[in-house]
Structure formats: structure tokens, C-alpha cells
Image (spheres, rainbow, N blue to C red):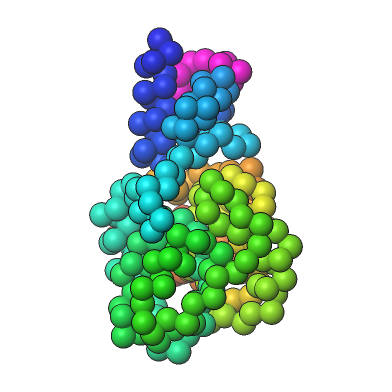
Amino acid sequence: MLKAQRHSYIMEKLRTDEKVLTSSLALDLNLSEDTVRRDLSELDRKKFLKKVYGGAILFEEKINETFNIHITSEEKKERIVKKALSLLVDGQVIIMSGGTTNLVFAKLIPKDLKLTIYTYSLSIAMQLSQLPNIELILIGGKMQKTAMVTIGIDVIQVLSKIRADICFIGASSINVKQGLTEIGYEVSIVKKAMIESSDKVVSMFTSNKLNTKMPHGVCELSELDTIVTELDPKDDRLKEYRKSGVRIL
């Protein structure tokens, strides 16, 4: 396969899954992992993707100051979000992680709801700032520029002092045995702190994240109260998750 064809395959995979793993690409393309790493490095230099440990994520170009981020599979994410909105009631204290599903969630929160929302995501904070009845707290810290989220000890310390009703947490990967896993170590640590500070934990994600895993653990499946996908809760792809006892919307 020519290099241009490989690059085209990688970018198409990224647009579908929002992330790629070096090992999986090597198997898909019948190449060595070293060749895949060189391809990822070249695409990273050209700003088509962001190379991270073990693979790459989609490069989220900041089109303008309002963070008009491209959202893949937006129709699926809207179906997910419309289910999750039923969990909101006036007066709740909420923690939101980053990710494009949570960004869609922020866009669709009813304007009349009165909520207190903590987030470490700059793009989500910008979206929430347009809602008049939201008390918004952006958690400050070291900025991870690729994802536009704050990380580090300052974020952990703020989270340790919060007692939230619900944490809406994004998922890079999920499976029955390992639970939620993340591609980035620092983000995985922040997400753990979010979970510890919340009475209930809800994870929203598209079904392509099911039965996948990343290098860094976030939580066991048993630590999630609810998972929300675009699938019917009785879909066969969710069979093992139903058996685990987690609520599925």
C-alpha cells in the first residue's frame, strides 16, 4: 500500500473513531508498528492529527475564539444526549469532563434549568456560559492544549473539595473487564478524581467505544451508575453490560 493510501486510511479511521491505536493500525494495514509510528509522526507534523502515547487522536482545530469544534457522529451524540437530559433536575451540582459528546450535551441543556456545573474543559465552559441559569465554575490548572482541558494537581485539589450530585464523564474506551480506560495518563487521573467527588456517575459515549481499551485505567464498570449510548438498551451489543448490573439508557 502506498503511503498516501495509508494516510487516507488512518484519517478515515480517525474521523470515525476519533482515535487510533498504533498496534491496531499495524494489524489492519499489515505493517510494522515502526512504519505506522512514522506515518503518525508525519501526519502530526502536518497538523492532521495529534500523536499521543500508543496512537493518535483527532486534531481539533480551533476555528475561532468561540471554539467552533468539529463534532463527528453528531446525530448519534444528539440521540445519546436527549436520553441523558432526563437525569437533570433543578438545583443539581454537576461535574462534566471534556469530549465532544459532553459538548453536545452542554449545547442541549434547557435554558430554564438552574444548575451548578464544574468543568475542566474550556470549550464546554464557553458553551455553558451562554446559559443564563447555570452557575459555571471552570476549574483552573495546567492547560492540555490539544484537548483544551486543564490537568494537574490544582485540578485534583479543587475536585477533592466538591460534592457533586452527578458526574457526566466521557469515555475514550470501555469494556466489561477493565471498565473505562483513557489514552492519556493525566486525563485519567483527573477523571478518577471527578468520580470520587460525585454521588452518581454517568458515562455517555457512542457504541464504537464499546469493547475497546486504552493504556490507562479510570474506573471499574461497577463504579458507573449509568451508561448512555445511541443504541436501544436491549441491543445485543450491550448484553454483557446489562449482566454487570449497570443501568443503561
Identify the main secondary structure in magenta: helix
Q: Does residue 109 appear left or right of residue 197 in this picture?
A: left
Residue 15 in the image: x percent, y percent? 36, 38
Q: How many marks?
A: 0
Q: Quadrant of residue 163?
A: bottom right
Q: Is residue 51 magenta?
A: no
Residue located 43% across and 13% down the image: 3
Residue 188 in the image: x percent, y percent? 63, 55
Q: Does residue 186 appear left or right of residue 46 in this picture?
A: right
Against 99, residue 127 (above or below) is below
Residue 113 in the image: x percent, y percent? 35, 84
Q: Does residue 10 appear left or right of residue 185 in this picture?
A: left
Instruction: Quarter of the image for the C terminus: give it.
Output: bottom left
Residue 25 in the image: x percent, y percent? 49, 26
- Work out whether residue 242 or residue 212 is closer to the camera in this orientation and state it: 212
Against 235, residue 208 (above or below) is above
Does residue 245 appear in this view? no
Q: Quadrant of residue 162?
A: bottom right
Against 56, residue 202 (above or below) is below
Q: Residue furthest bottom?
A: 91
Q: Residue furthest left?
A: 75
Residues in magenta, as a range: 24-36
Does residue 8 appear in this view? yes
Instruction: Quarter of the image for the N terminus: give it.
Output: top left
Residue located 38% across and 58% down the image: 66
Residue located 41% across and 56% down the image: 65
Q: Is residue 25 magenta?
A: yes
